[in-house]
Amino acid sequence: MSIDVKFNRVSKTYHPGEKVTGVVVVSNRDSATKHAGINLTVEGNVSLQLSARSVGIFEAFYSSVKPQPLIYYEIPVSPAAKVPEGVTEIPFEFVLKPLTGSQLHDTYHGVYVNVRYSVAVEMPRGMLSSTLKEVREFFVELNRDPEVMEAARAAKPFKFRISPESLLNVKESSKKKIPEFLFEGHLNRVRCAISEAFEGEIIVKKCPVNIRSIELQLVRVETCNHVEGETREATEIQNIQIADGNAPRNLAIPIHMVFPRLFTCCTTVTKQFKVEFEVNLIVLFEGDHMVTENFPILLYR
């Protein structure tokens, strides 16, 4: 005998306030089998995890490590009964609403911050048989905010210019050894819809040395608050090469990147945690020298 959960929506993606529907599927190859009732548990929470560098402040961090509940339902699907031979489907439904005092967030699979929603089904079968359990994740996307969308779309392209003079965290004595390069370009938006591509262009105006590669790196910045301050960690989500080899001069090289859904979410700032995003434009020269330009971005639904 086995048990499973199937959602009526193939994408398993829902918005706050929507009704989530599906069926509990019980497959029984034997004759009618008794069970003590079938129950469904709906959970959503934010889990915060310490990084290796933060282990030393565990005592100060304990209040933030505990999962923060966002949604919780217990739904009786079937009373105690017999399951007939074959496949039995039992429908269920619930409305996607947060617990009192909480608010829902986008589903997000991070390194130190995770926002997950799941449905767990459990069917006890008595003392002599093990309890059947199954857990299925579903996904939550926040509703679109028309005002945020309008403000973002009205913003002008963000222009950038990268040269030895614009570099930060470089000693003045070292700047004299850097070749006189010049990169110009623009990003269509730094306030970006998560469902749309991140786009722009870069032009190599001047570079006396050979270029090995030009890359685009998407970075998440996860911040967890604790009684002594906050712990902030930046990790790479993906790296895309937009030019391979010695890029031609004065030619517009397109920038195009799709945001991976589960590893990104709307920029989120709460009292307990923050999830923010940045894009690094990386130029690798021959000889393993590298120039990086950082662009903080804001993601919205």
Image (spheres, rainbow, N blue to C red):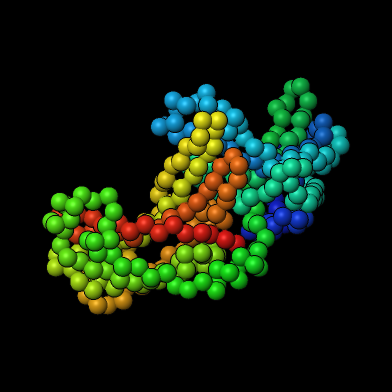
Q: Residue at x 65, y 53 (%)?
A: 140
Q: Nearer the viewer, residue 274 or 213?
A: 274
Query: Where's the N terminus, which quadrant?
Result: top right
* Residue at x-position 58% and y-position 69%: 151
Viewer-closest of 81 and 211: 211
Apparent side of residue 120 relative to residue 267 in the rendered image (left or right): right
Using the image as rendered, state which of residue 211 and residue 94 is in the foreground. 211
User: Quadrant of residue 64 in the image?
Assistant: top right
- Give the x, y percent position of residue 218: 41, 56
Q: Position of residue 212 (x, y in %)?
A: 21, 62
Q: Is residue 252 above or below residue 217?
A: below
State whether residue 278 is above or below residue 133.
Answer: below
Tell me the quarter of the picture where residue 17 sits: bottom right
Name the quadrant of the C terminus: bottom right
Instruction: Name the side, left or right, on which 9 lies relative to 114.
Output: right
Q: Count numbered badges in the picture.
A: 0
Q: Report the front residue among 34 and 188.
A: 188
Query: Is residue 229 visible in this depiction of the protein?
Result: yes
Residue 83 in view here = no
Q: Looking at the image, which residue is at 57% across and 61% down?
A: 300
Where does residue 253 sit, x and y in percent of width and height? 32, 73
At a point 20% along the width and 66% down the height, the residue shown is 181
| Residue 41: % across, % down | 74, 39
- In the image: residue 282, left or right of residue 124: left
